[in-house]
Amino acid sequence: MKFKKVTLLGATGVLAIMLSAGVAYAAQDNNSTSISPVNAVTENGGAKDKVEKHHGCGAELAGILGMDANTLSQELKSGKTLAQIAAAQGMDANTLTGKLQAAFNDRIDKAVANGKLTADKAATMKAKTAAKATSIINKSWTGHKGGAGKSNVFKNVRQQIPALLGNMDAAQLKAQLQSGKTLVQIAQDRGIAKDKLVSDLQSIMKANLDQAVKDNKITADNATQIESKLPQMIERMVTRVDKD
């Protein structure tokens, strides 16, 4: 199991993720067994190579607006929306929406060409790109940390899993995961029911979210949104097979 370094992204990085995340997650769904059960929750989008790709996307966004990427980042951090920034650059909202939609569609087409998406999945995603582009240009990104911020909130979860399994040795847990067992199977082998494991993980992750809000790492609204997705996140986490 590989645990990769999490790197926080700036405002343009958050928007870059919006350009590429749909393709990344759809590709992940098509290859779900290749994702580590712990990495799936704790390291979503945090690898250095992914960060570099997001920075490239940030430059793409700046290029669409005809401005420097650092200037765009500062404008977003000030609370301006993309629509407001575009207007100052002499570009109306409809033009910006069309350019963003084209960028989304181009990435989807490339994912299909590279075998990361099926044609059917691509068609479904393309049907939503206009709405996604409209949402992005009217959104304020002040204080938004995106996927990398969520990863940072949960970065200590994996260290706490051995304790949930009866103070299991971390090296032994890693070996069993690499052998193809899920967290549920490992827990059951140790007499711990799935419901108990899920409940304990949810308590830990909820506590992490509460602490992140207190530390001003995420907003209360961000925490509420993430918390609503915890059941699905944890289900994937405890049932996913590690094939690394």
Image (spheres, rainbow, N blue to C red):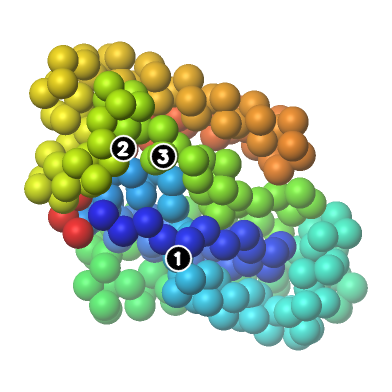
Work out whether mark 1 precedes mark 2 in sequence or the reverse, and give the earlier one.
1
Mark 1–mark 2 Cα distance, whole angstroms, equals: 18 Å
Relative horizontal placement of residue 120, taking residue 222 as reference (left or right): left
Whole-percent x, y for residue 46 in the image: 48, 60
Q: Nearer the viewer, mark 3 or mark 1?
A: 3
Label 2: state its secondary structure. Answer: helix
Q: Say left or right for 155 vs 77.
A: left
Q: Are marks 3 and 1 in contact (CB under 8 Å)?
A: no
Mark 1 nearby-residue class (10 Å; few <14, some 14–19, many ≥20): some
Q: Position of residue 60 (x, y in %)?
A: 61, 80
Please say whether residue 194 is visible from this viewpoint: yes
Q: Secondary structure at mark 1?
A: loop
Percent coordinates x, y for residue 200 in the rendering: 39, 19
**How busy is the neighbourhood of tag 3: few (under 14 within 10 Å), some, or many (20 plus)?**
few
Q: Residue at x 38, y 17 (%)?
A: 199
* Image depth: mark 3 or mark 2 in front: 3
Label 2 CA crowd tier, 10 Å (few <14, some 14–19, many 20+): many
**Residue denoted by label 1:** 47
Residue 117, given in percent of the width and then of the height, sits at: 27, 65
Where residue 74 sits, quadrant-wise, is bottom right
Instruction: Looking at the picture, tell me which residue is in the foreground, 158 or 118.
Output: 158
The correct choice, above or below, for 88 with respect to 151 in the image is: below
Give the number of callouts: 3
3D distance between C-alphas at marks 3 and 2: 14 Å
Q: Sequence-wise, which precedes: disc 3 or disc 1? A: 1
Point 70% across, 49% down: residue: 144
Q: Residue at x 23, y 63 (%)?
A: 118
Residue that mark 2 sits on:
237
Q: Which mark is residue 159?
A: 3
